[in-house]
Structures are given as structure tokens and as C-alpha cells.
Image (spheres, grey):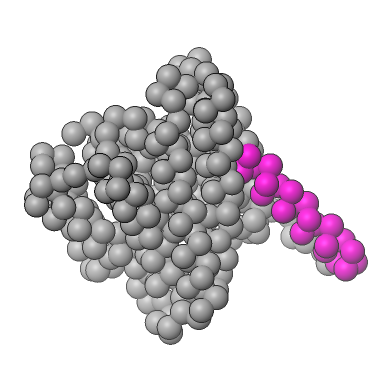
Amino acid sequence: MLTVILGFTTAVVYGFADFFGAIASRKISSLKVTAVSGVIGFVFLSTMIPFFGAKFSELAIITGVAAGIASAIGISALYASLAIGPISIVSPMGAVLGALVPLTFGFFIGDRFGPIGWAALALILIAVVLVGFVPGADVRLPSAKGLFFATIAGAGIGTILIVLKYSPTDSGMASILVMRLVSAIFLNFVLIGVWLRNRAKNDSSVREAVPGKFWWAVVAAGVFDSSANIFFTLALRSGSLSVVSVLTALYPLGTIILARLVLKERIAKVQMVGVLLALGGSAILAVA
């Protein structure tokens, strides 16, 4: 029960982070949003050490570095796949793969469920596809390049969960702190590389000043993303990798909730069906 609650909360909070990241990306490059929010997230996590602790053992550092590399690769590939599109296909594809990779791994390490449990997991995976679908988007078939990056994104995100499953239970937030630091360093190096390349091209175009509210959106994205890191770490330590991975893949749910509340966007019928399936599947999983 606790694992299901924490896993579902992880998904919703991740979705909140994506919402604010998307808002910020309207005026700021997605790479800069990701890099800056990563630094903000690391600072935020550092302030949580007195509450959750952080014991930097060798294993905690190793798992943190591995997760950080997987995060940097996965998130970079995710943005690349979304840029190539079509979003309506590559977005849910990446989310499903991000669940299937640790779900498969969990089966091999001994995660077992009864028929009702497997049915609930299947129901949630279907919900992931429906919730992540972007109605009205271009329905053209994805290119091989788009599929490649979506696959890398899903594998990278799934690998994070697998690696952090093996972080020491007494390490507190040590592993996710290292993960955020490694990922932020990598992405900021990429950001500096892009800046140097543009400078070498004598890119002297006048850039419009970015209103402060968009930078506040970057801050919110970093705080929510790091908060989700805490929730999924707690979820992984409380129960099954398979359950956490499938529930975490529901992250588009948080995005459409905020889009409805803040931007007054309508929830498409197909997404509403996905929301209901997600809630039903989670309820069944909690008692299975």
C-alpha cells in the first residue's frame, strides 16, 4: 500500500516538474532549462539533508554516479525525441519503455505477483500510453531517429530506477544527491559547449529579455523534480521495483492536472480514460 502511494505521488510530482519545465521552455531553451533546474534541484536536495540524512558510503556514491550518467543520457535523449516527434507517439513510447526496462529486471530478481497484480500492472501500462498521448498532434509515423532517441530515453530513465534500487537503505539522500550533481555537471558542460559553438559562429543576434516568471518556472521545475527523486527513493526502499517503475511512468498525469488547473486546458477524452484506468489500476495494485 505504502509503495503504491509513494510511486503514484512520484509520478504526479514528476509531472508537475515537466509542466513548469514546459512553461519555462516557451522563452528559454530546453537545454538551459534542464541544466539550470538541475543545479537548483541539487541545492534544494542539499537543504533536505537534515530531514532525510545522507551517508556517503562507497556504494551510495557508485550508485549515484551511475544513476547520474543514466539521467543525463536519458533526459537528453528524451528532449531530442520530443524535438523530432511526433510527440503523440514518442512521448508515451519513452514512458512505457521507462517502465518495462525495470519491470523486466524486477521479474528476473524475483518480483512476483498474482493474476490480479499482473492485470493491474498491465492496466496501468495501458493508462501510461493514454495519459501520455497528445491529442491533435501530428500523427505522422516517427522516423528511425525519433524512435532511436525515444528508446534511449526510456532505457535511461528505467536504468535510474534499477540502479537506485541498490543504493544502501541507510544512505538517506546520498545517492540521489550524487545523481543530481553528476547529471547537472554533465548538462552544464553541454550547455557551455553549445554557448562556445555559437560564439565561434559569431552569433551576435539580439536576444529578447526573458521575463522573471519564466525563471521562476525553472526554479519550480528543479524543486519538483528533486522532490520526486525523494519520493521514488522512498518508494524503492519500501517495496517492489516493478510496482514503482510502472507507477512512475504515469508522470504525464501530473502535467495534465496542472495544465487543467493553471492553464484551464481541457483534458481530452482519451486522456481522461487513461486517468481513470490509472486510478483503478493503482487501487487494485494496492490491495492485490
The reply to whether residue 187 is visible in this rendering is: yes
Residue 184 picture location, percent across and down: 64, 42
| Residue at 40% across, 24% down | 169
Q: Is residue 31 left or right of residue 140?
A: right
Instruction: Assign the C terminus to one quadrant of the image.
Output: top left
Q: Is residue 77 above or below residue 188?
A: below
Q: Quadrant of residue 196?
A: bottom right
Residue 229 picture location, percent across and down: 45, 37
In this rendered view, identify the residue nearer to me: 283 or 163.
Answer: 163
Instruction: Give the mark count.
Output: 0
191 falls in the magenta region = yes
Q: Which residues are magenta?
A: 182-204
| Residue at 34% across, 35% down | 236
201 falls in the magenta region = yes
| Residue at 35% across, 73% down | 135
In this rendered view, identify the residue nearer to me: 250 or 71.
Answer: 71
The reply to whether residue 249 is visible in this rendering is: no
Instruction: Assign the N terminus to one quadrant of the image.
Output: top left
Residue 153 picture location, percent across and down: 49, 59
| Residue at 59% across, 50% down | 72
Extreme top residue here?
50
Q: Is residue 104 above or below residue 133?
A: above
